[in-house]
Image (tube, rainbow, N blue to C red):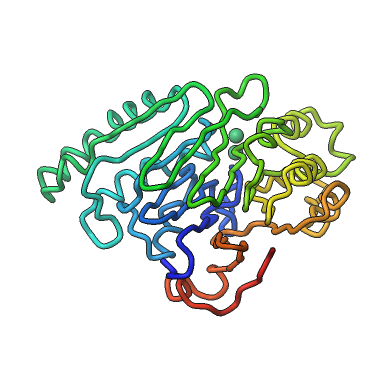
Amino acid sequence: MNKTCDFRVTLLGTGTPIPSPERFGPSTLIEAGDQKLLIDAGRGATIRLYQLGVPIGHLDVVLLTHFHSDHTSGLADVWLTGWLQSYFGDRKGPFRVVGPRGTERLMTKLQEAYAADIKIRMDDEKLPREAVALSVLEYGHDGVVHERNGVKVIAFEVDHGDVIKPAYGYRIEYKGRVAVISGDTRYNQNVVKYGAGADLLVHEVAITRPELMSDAYIRRIMAHHTTARDAGMVFEQTKPKLAAYTHLVFLSGPRTPPASIAELIIETRQTYRGPLEVGEDLMCFEIGETVTVRRLGLAGYASDRGSTGGTLQMT
Ligand SMILES: [Zn+2]
Ligand SMILES: [Zn+2]
C-alpha cells in the first residue's frame, strides 16, 4: 500500500445485474492498515482484484450487504479461487464472511454445491483444508460487526424496499477517518445517521427518464433505489469530504436511451453542491487529511498503486 496512505477504498464493480464489461457487479475493496476487506462480491470481483495485484486469498473478511444475486454471484469465485495456492490466490486460513441473517445458509449451501471441487482439489492438488474452511458471522441489527487492529466496521440497516430484507450498509472507521458504503437502498435516514462525519460517502443511485415511469417494471426498480436528487439530499445532510456514486442503475426502454452521466450530475446538483465523483470500476479513493481520487483503470493497474501521478485533490 502507498506509504502515504493507509486507508483506501477501491470500487471493483460499479454496476448492476447488467453483464457490462465496463461496470462489473457490485464490489468494493477497503484497505485499512494491515487489513483488506471486501464489501459484496459481485460478478468479476476476482478479476478486478487480480488487476490490482491483490491476491484473492489475502482478503481478511468479506462483508455482504444483502442477498440480491448481483452482490453475491462472485462469492464462490472469491472463496475458491482465493483457495488456490498460487500467487493470485494464496489463502492460508478460513474464508471469513460477515453478513446479515441468511449468510450462514448461503455459505453452507455453497459448500455443498462445490463439495466435489473441494474434495478433488484436496486429493489432487493437496490444497489445505483449513484454507477452504468457512468462518461466518451473522448479525441481525445495527452494530459493530468487525473490529481488529484499529479497523472498526459498523453495519447499519437500510431500506431497499419492503420485501428486500435484510439490507445493510457499512461504516468503516480507521484512525479517526471514516468511509461509508450505503449498500442498496432508497432514501434512508439511517444512511444520514451513520454517514455523519464521513470523509468518503459512497452511495448507490438510480436514474431513468420521466416517460418511462409509466412502466410498472421501471417504477418498481426505481422504488428500490435512490434517485440522484435524493442521494444529493443525503450528501447535503452528511456533508462528506467527498461523495461518490457506485451501483449506477441507468434504466432505459426499447425506444428510450438511458440518461447520461452529465444528466446524473445535473440531477444531483439540484440538491447538493459539494464534491462529487461518479464512480468507475477501479476508481480508488485515498483517505488521508483529504480524499484523493485515482483512476487505476486508466493509468494501468498494479504499477500505478503507490505512484504519485494523476491525482485529483478533493477537500
Ligand atoms: Zn439489491
Ligand atoms: Zn444491487
Q: Is residue 261 shown above or below 126?
A: below
Q: Nearer the viewer, residue 272 or 105?
A: 272
Q: Could you say where residue 14 lies in the image, as x and y percent from the top left? A: 59, 51
Residue 102 relative to residue 58: left or right: right
Residue 312 can be seen, yes or no: yes
Label total for image: 0
Residue at the spot x=74%, y=34% of the render? 187
In this rendering, the answer to whether 2 lies above or below 170 is below
Of the pair 245 and 70, the residue shown nearer to us = 245
Image position, residue 139 (x, y; %): 44, 25
Q: Nearer the viewer, residue 240 or 135?
A: 240
Q: Name the image quarter holding residue 171.
A: top right
Quadrant housing the C terminus:
bottom right
Q: Horizontal and vertical percent for residue 245?
A: 67, 51
Say which residue appears at 62% left-offset and 59% top-offset: 280
Image quarter where ligand 1 lies: top right
Q: Is residue 270 left or right of residue 69?
A: right
- Seen in the picture, residue 170 relative to 43 is either above or below; the reply is above
Q: Is residue 284 visible?
A: no
Q: Position of residue 1 (x, y in %)?
A: 41, 66
Outermost residue toward the front in this view: 176
- Residue sitting at x 89%, y 40%: 211
- The residue located at (62%, 63%) in the rendering is 290
